[in-house]
Image (cartoon, helix red, strand yellow):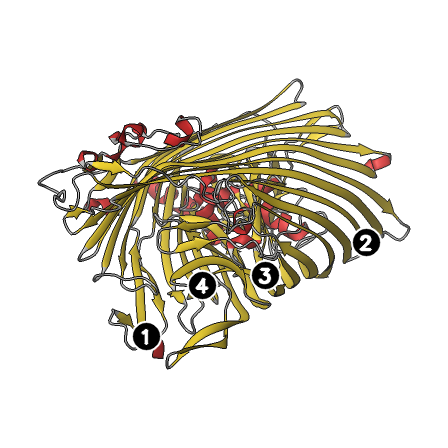
């Protein structure tokens, strides 16, 4: 017995002495990209193996002198590699399991879905592009595109009233200076005033990748001074794919306060004026209104609920590819605000505002592709995105208060038919075309606000109820003709010509009614005595509503464009030169013209937009890029309409004399891809803007208006640094952007009793000098764990512009910390958790300290007068996902 034990120990010791550590990597045989999560087994010892990490590497301890490694991964052919006793560093090349059909090759992996694929797109692009893969989006703590995009370099977000991301700001350029594409096609906006698209309407799980283009080529639409955001939706796979996920969560804000909601299901969608058939005699009484929708409840909200489903497959000998996807999100969010001081308005002490917002998002898309043969392909995309928000804003100061009950619905419908055709040998001549029909719609029916004086309802103008709706109907067509000419010596010319035409029609409706207390001045209606809920208040309607408001208008925009572009490739050089011509015809017609407003307005202009790009391969896996492009920004439909409206904090006004913006943009970027999933980028950019459009506070008579204006010429320059590095189980993503913008405008200043004009230089609206993101990624492929800790910092930025010297409102620097973790099992099931806004850092707005604020008796920070503070609460989510 003892001799057997000794013999066993000697054999084990001998084996350990002979054992050697083997290091290796798994790569795509064609692209060279590292493959994460591949299984590596020893054929002679099936129980011993490893899984490749985030950099594609693996480690094994082997005692045999010779053995065979068996490597497998979904979408790739199984690979066997014989290893000798001298091999210690091994590369296993996996070949893609492509599906070949009648000369058509359908690649199993969409390159943009993986981190390595995203880096490959950035590297091969003709211009300056950043890409976020589907894998990075999936692991992100964010559930909407608006929140996901803030992780990308040079991007900040503007938040909605519930604290969620809504609009992207690229390189310090306000949201108006970029446009949004779906699968490369521009879409209209459901926004009730502007042409920019709210990105919170898109669930992030419906994307294959997210692209941010920062320099334009001639074949791209020219109204992207900041850049373009391209949402590439889920594409048909080469083999059957099925995914489903379900999650729930809660916002910490409602741990210690109730969620306020109202009976928005009782809202009558049409205003009394519409219900009556829009007659000339439009007098109303309380019989024309319901009060059922004014009933409010105070209780804890239900948990959040999100769900997603996607199915993809190929049919008819794999010629037809189908991807169907749907998403549902129902979340409860909110905000708590404290307003201390606002120029041009008065408060009786601090005004406290509590927001309660229920957001419901529905997304669905069907994407079909049909390979007629090796040279001809058709793609048909249909998408529907719908967001509904029911929001209560309850605010009060020491003497006055108001409650607003608002329900808004926005949706975007898009149908795009694309054709890709190749002719001549090797597809030297190519023709691509697209036909697009889109509609964007927004409605806010019966937006009700009730005003309080102390503990009783105001007697005069006790309530206001407003109906608004608008739609954009967009028809557009694109055509591109490309010819490739190969010359002796390996140089290549690519010639492209094409055009685009878009016809957009918008209609806008606005109808507002005011109400007095039905019991009059002598008998105020006290809360808790005469009424307990808002539907119990007695109102009397003022006879006539605001029917003839300039917000009732029809607008149109016709854009025609043509371009020519040439690309020359030789050795490590690429040169691209092109010119684009765009003609704009934009106008409006007021349905109810007034004496002080032009009944019709029109703007016509033609822009010539040259561009030039150079890319040089400075060394292996590295490029140096230079780009120049001229671009424009058009006024929104609403901005050139001579409207005037009483809004939340200020009166707003349109500007029919608003000019469009023209900008010259220069980019220089060095990019290095040490491995297929890694990158190091450093870039510089410079923009010179003529007539930038910004909103500012303007005094006209006794009123202060918030108005779009051209303040003069401006410059915007900065530096971007982007780093992505992976180790076996650990990864880091970091980016930093410094932006400096400058514009000099005339401001007012008081000297004694006189108002004088002085010049002041300031940054552009919404631009933060410092923006940084840092994400730490952890992955144990062997045990199926992935996690991410993501922090973002947005520096101080200009929030509202005043026409008084040093009276602008600024937003203080803001830090956000988010986290996510996921555990995967071999049966395709994974569980995940997400947490956002962990620090719950208050958003703070202020007016800088100066002589003009010396007499202001309000709370201060570092001497600056605080305008408001806002908190949004932490959000937590727990879910399950299944992939087939």
Q: Which circle's residue, 4 or 2, is located before the other in the chain?
A: 2
- Residue occupying the point 49% across, 77% down: 758
Cα separation between marks 3 and 4? 42 Å
Cα separation between marks 1 and 3? 44 Å
- Residue occupying the point 35% across, 79% down: 851
SS at mark 4? strand
- Residue occupying the point 14% across, 42% down: 525
The quadrant where residue 502 appears:
top right
Q: Which circle's residue, 1 or 3, is located before the other in the chain?
A: 3
Cα separation between marks 1 and 2? 60 Å
Which label sits in the foreground, 3 or 4?
A: 4
Asked if one can make out residue 620 in the rendered structure from this viewpoint, the answer is no
- Disc 3 marks which residue? 681
- In the image shown, does 146 or 279 lie closer to the viewer? 279
Q: Which circle's residue, 3 or 4, is located before the other in the chain?
A: 3
Which label sits in the foreground, 1 or 2?
A: 1
Badges 1 and 3: C-beta atoms under 8 Å apart? no
- Disc 1 marks which residue? 853
- Disc 2 marks which residue? 568
SS at mark 2? strand
- Disc 4 marks which residue? 698
- In the image shown, does 171 or 61 lie closer to the viewer? 171
Residue 135, percent from left and from top: 50, 42
Badges 1 and 2: C-beta atoms under 8 Å apart? no
Cα separation between marks 4 and 2? 51 Å
């Amino acid at each position: 017995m003892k001799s057997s034990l000794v013999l066993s120990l000697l054999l084990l010791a001998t084996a350990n002495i002979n054992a050697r550590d083997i290091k290796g990597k798994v790569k795509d045989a064609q692209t060279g990209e590292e493959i994460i999560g591949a299984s590596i087994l020893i054929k002679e010892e099936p129980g011993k193996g490893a899984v490749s990490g985030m950099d594609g590497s693996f480690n094994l301890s082997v005692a045999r002198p010779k053995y065979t490694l068996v490597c497998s991964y979904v979408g790739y052919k199984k690979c066997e590699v014989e290893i000798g006793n001298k091999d210690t560093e091994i590369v296993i090349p996996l070949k893609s399991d492509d599906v070949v059909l009648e000369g058509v090759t359908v690649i199993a992996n969409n390159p943009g879905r993986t981190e390595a694929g995203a880096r490959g797109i950035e590297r091969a692009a003709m211009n300056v592009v950043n890409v976020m893969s589907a894998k990075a989006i999936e692991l992100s703590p964010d559930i909407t595109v608006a929140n996901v995009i803030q992780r990308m370099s040079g991007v900040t977000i503007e938040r909605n009233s519930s604290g969620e991301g809504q609009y992207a700001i690229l390189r310090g350029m306000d949201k108006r200076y970029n446009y949004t594409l779906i699968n490369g096609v521009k879409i209209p906006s459901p926004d009730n005033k502007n042409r920019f698209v709210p990105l919170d309407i898109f669930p992030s799980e419906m994307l294959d990748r997210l692209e941010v283009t920062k320099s334009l080529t001639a074949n791209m639409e020219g109204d992207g001074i900041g850049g373009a955001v391209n949402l590439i939706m889920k594409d048909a796979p080469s083999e059957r794919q099925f995914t489903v996920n379900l999650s729930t969560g809660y916002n910490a804000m409602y741990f210690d306060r109730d969620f306020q909601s109202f009976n928005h299901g009782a809202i009558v969608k049409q205003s009394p004026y519409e219900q009556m058939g829009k007659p000339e005699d439009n007098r109303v009484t309380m019989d024309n209104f319901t009060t059922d929708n004014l009933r409010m409840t105070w209780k804890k909200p239900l948990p959040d609920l999100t769900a997603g489903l996607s199915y993809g497959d190929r049919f008819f000998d794999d010629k037809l590819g189908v991807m169907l996807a749907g998403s549902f999100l129902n979340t409860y969010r909110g905000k708590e605000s404290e307003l201390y001081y606002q120029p041009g308005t008065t408060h009786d002490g601090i005004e406290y505002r509590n927001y309660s917002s229920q957001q419901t998002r529905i997304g669905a898309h069907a994407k079909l592709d049909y390979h007629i043969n090796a040279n001809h392909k058709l793609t048909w995309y249909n998408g529907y995105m719908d967001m509904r928000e029911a929001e209560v804003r309850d605010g009060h100061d020491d003497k006055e208060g108001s409650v607003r009950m608002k329900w808004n619905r926005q949706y975007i419908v898009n149908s795009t038919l694309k054709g890709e055709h190749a002719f001549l040998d090797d597809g030297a001549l190519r023709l691509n075309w697209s036909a697009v029909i889109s509609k964007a719609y927004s409605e806010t029916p019966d937006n009700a606000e009730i005003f309080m004086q102390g503990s009783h309802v105001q007697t005069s103008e006790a309530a206001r109820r407003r109906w608004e709706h608008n739609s954009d109907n967009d028809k557009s067509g694109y055509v591109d003709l490309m010819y490739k000419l190969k010359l002796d010596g390996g140089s290549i010319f690519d010639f492209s010509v094409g055009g685009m035409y878009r016809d957009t029609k918008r209609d806008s409706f606005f109808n507002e009614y005011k109400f007095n207390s039905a019991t009059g001045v002598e008998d105020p209606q006290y809360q808790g005595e005469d009424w307990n809920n808002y539907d119990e208040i007695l109102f009397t309607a003022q006879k006539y509503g605001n029917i003839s408001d300039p917000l009732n208008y029809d607008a149109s925009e016709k854009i025609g464009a043509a371009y020519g572009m040439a690309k020359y490739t030789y050795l490590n050089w690429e040169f691209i030169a092109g010119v684009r011509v765009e003609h704009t015809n934009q106008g409006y017609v007021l349905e109810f013209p007034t004496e002080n407003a032009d009944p019709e307005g029109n703007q016509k202009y033609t822009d010539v937009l040259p561009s030039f790009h150079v890319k040089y391969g400075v060394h292996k896996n590295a490029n140096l890029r230079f780009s120049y492009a001229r671009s424009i920004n058009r006024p929104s439909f609403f901005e050139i309409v001579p409207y005037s409206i009483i809004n939340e904090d200020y009166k707003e006004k349109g500007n029919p004399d608003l000019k469009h913006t023209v900008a010259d943009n220069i980019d220089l970027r060095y990019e290095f891809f040490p491995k297929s999933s890694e990158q190091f980028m450093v870039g510089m950019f410079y923009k010179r803007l003529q007539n930038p459009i910004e909103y500012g506070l303007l005094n006209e008579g006794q009123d202060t208006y918030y108005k779009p204006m051209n303040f003069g010429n401006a410059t915007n320059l900065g530096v971007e640094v982007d780093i992505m590095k992976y180790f076996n189980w650990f990864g880091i993503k970091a980016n930093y952007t410094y932006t400096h913008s400058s514009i000099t405008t005339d401001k007012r200043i008081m000297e004694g009793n006189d108002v004088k004009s002085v010049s002041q230089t300031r940054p552009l609206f919404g631009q933060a000098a410092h923006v940084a993101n840092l994400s730490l990624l952890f992955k144990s492929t062997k045990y199926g764990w992935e996690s991410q800790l993501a922090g973002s910092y947005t520096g101080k930025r200009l929030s509202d512009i005043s026409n008084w010297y040093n009276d602008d409102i600024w937003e203080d620097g803001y830090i956000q910390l988010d986290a996510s973790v996921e555990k995967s099992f071999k049966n395709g099931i994974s569980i995940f958790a997400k947490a956002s806004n962990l620090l719950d850092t208050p958003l703070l707005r202020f007016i800088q300290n100066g002589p003009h604020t010396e007499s202001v008796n309000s709370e201060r920070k570092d001497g600056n007068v605080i305008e408001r503070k806002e908190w949004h609460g932490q959000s937590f989510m727990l879910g399950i996902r299944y992939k087939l």
